[in-house]
């Protein structure tokens, strides 16, 4: 993911939790800050589930 720090910042400051994978992907698709490649990679790496915090999402997609 080319804009990993941007993704982390967004997940921590702009996303509301709990959030499902579908909700996270919908939010991601609305962002112009990220390339289509980054959006696709995020969707492929994020397992199905409900996430209670940005840290859970970051761990799930391996951005730590």
Image (cartoon, rainbow, N blue to C red):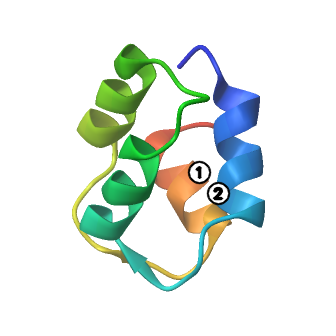
Displayed quadrant of residue 8: top right
Residue found 29% across the figure and 27% down from its top: 40
| Helix, strand or loop status at disc 2 | helix
Residue 41 lies, with reference to residue 43, above or below; the image says above
Choose mark 1 or mark 2, whichever is in front: 2
Q: Quadrant of the C terminus?
A: top right
Residue bearing the label numbered 2: 11
Position of residue 31 relative to residue 56, above or below, is above
Q: Position of residue 26 (x, y in %)?
A: 33, 57
Read off the residue under disc 1: 58
Q: Nearer the viewer, residue 62 or 53?
A: 53
Q: In percent of the image, x 27 and y 72: which residue is there? A: 49
**Residue at image x 25%, y 35%?**
44
Residue 26 can be seen in this image: yes
Snapshot quadrant of residue 37: top left
Please give the name of the residue rendered at 42% of the width and 77% of the height, measured from the top-left corner: 19
Q: Is residue 64 visible?
A: no
What is the x, y in percent for residue 52? 53, 82
Mark with earlier residue (1, 2): 2
Residue 31 in percent (x, y) is at 52, 41
Q: Are marks 1 and 2 in contact (CB under 8 Å)?
A: yes
Left-right relation of 56 to 7: left
Task: Please state the horizontal and vertical placement of residue 62, each as a whole percent of the image.
Answer: 53, 38
The crowd level at tag 1 (other Cα within 10 Å; few <14, some 14-19, many 20+) is some
């Amino acid at each position: 993911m080319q804009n990993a720090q941007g993704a982390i910042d967004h997940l921590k400051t702009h996303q509301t939790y709990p959030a499902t994978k579908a909700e996270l992907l919908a939010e991601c698709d609305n962002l112009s800050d990220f390339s289509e490649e980054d959006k696709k990679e995020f969707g492929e790496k994020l397992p199905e589930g409900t996430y209670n915090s940005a840290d859970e999402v970051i761990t799930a997609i391996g951005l730590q």
